[in-house]
Amino acid sequence: MNRSDPDPLPLIETLRTQLKSELDSILHYWSTETIDTTFGGFFGEINYANEKNPKAEKGSVLNARILWSFSAAYPITQNENHKLLAKRAFDYLVHHFYDHENGGIFWSIYHDGTPKDTKNQIYALAFTIYGLAEYYKISADNSALTLAIALYHKIQLHSLDVMYNGYFEAFTQDWKLLDDLRLSEKDANEKKTMNTHLHIVEAYANLYTIWPDQNLKAAITNLLELIDCHFINKVNGHLRLFFDENWNENQDVISYGHDIEAAWLLLWCAERIEDQHWILKYQENAILLTNAAARGLDEDGGLWYELEIQTQKRIEEKHWWPQAEWLIGMVNAYQITRDTAYLELAEKNLEFIQKHLIDDKQGEWFWGIDKNYEKIEKDKAGFWKCPYHNSRACIEILNRLSS
């Protein structure tokens, strides 16, 4: 793409107006449909038909992402209820997900708040730090900052590979390395993954904005270097997803959603630490990853899910979260290049979302659609279906296009 439009303002205004409205809609859903008034916190599962399961287990990632979403939205909405819901998520996290004895985060708890899966999945610790840092920005609650710093130290102490660099995936409650390291059953069981490294650096960068510690900055710089060296395929522009501890790759899939998420998010991390070398490097990487992700773009403006590397078979589904990341990625690419073709792709993707993913009757976004445009009947809210991706797309773009 190299075309430049002298007047991007109509496109920008369209995105701003529609995404402000959509942010309000998403937050309304999570404010009214997800509150567990019986056992506290938020429901662990609401299904495709919007039926609540009050006995469902509750995931730490869901709770941490709710904490982040309401905290990040509050400066835009100035809605005091959003601030109260962020506090609700924070209080519930501290009292039920935080392991006060071992200093970790339970992967999941039963509906009544008692521990269920007590493993320390570093991915969950990272999202907890991410949410805590955002909550501190609106609350100035020192206990949130203290806990975020403590979890950062736990990751550095136990997860950092001091021999080969990088971060191991998962540990027992008392911090012994697990044999089964996977985030989910669909993932390869490898010791080092792109997904976890991406969200560690995201969490660390957000923590740095409120706690500019030099050791933390060094950890962020190290992660940016690791990702540039190992996880970004400089030949085809896609991400490499799975490695053993010696950095031998286990080829699995190409994830278009992660490609575009990494494209903007890693540059965001470099900008937080104001490192000019890594800002320039990740501007370059952003366009590389963005153009690679575009291979998964369909004519209708939606982004396909994944491509199996060995068979070259495309997973012909369009899930909610890659669409949200694509929106941010297009605005990010526009800001780097000033090529309004990227804004046009964002507008077309938003039209796809509005037509196929947003539930106009009951709120929120559906999980996704298949190649025949049939709805995928998975959670509306649940272990992996959170307000994080779609609210963040609205929040990030509104913040970027505010001036």
Image: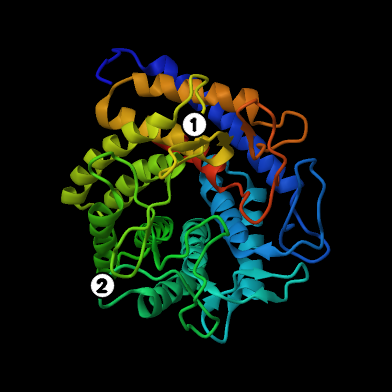
Residue farthest to the front? 311
Residue 309, image x and y in percent? 41, 44
Which residue appears at 27% of the width and 37% of the height? 288
Residue marked by disc 2:
164
Residue marked by disc 1:
303
Q: Nearer the viewer, residue 328 or 214?
A: 328
Residue 166, image x and y in percent? 31, 67
Identify which amino acid the numbered label 2 is placed on.
Answer: Tyr
- Residue 75 numbered tag: none
Identify which amino acid the numbered label 1 is placed on.
Answer: Leu
Residue 395, image x and y in percent? 50, 40
Element type at mark 1: loop
Quadrant occupied by the C terminus? top left
Report the side of 149 relative to 91 (left or right). left
Identify the colour scheme used: rainbow
Which residue appears at 50% of the width and 33% of the height? 304
Badge 2 density bin: few <14, some 14–19, many ≥20, Cα 10 Å: few
Q: Is residue 365 visible?
A: yes
Residue 70, image x and y in percent? 59, 50
Asked if residue 99 is positioned above or below residue 195 in the image, the reply reads below
Q: Is residue 401 visible?
A: no
Quadrant occupied by the N terminus? top left
Q: Quadrant of residue 58?
A: bottom right
Report the side of 164 relative to 371 (left or right). left
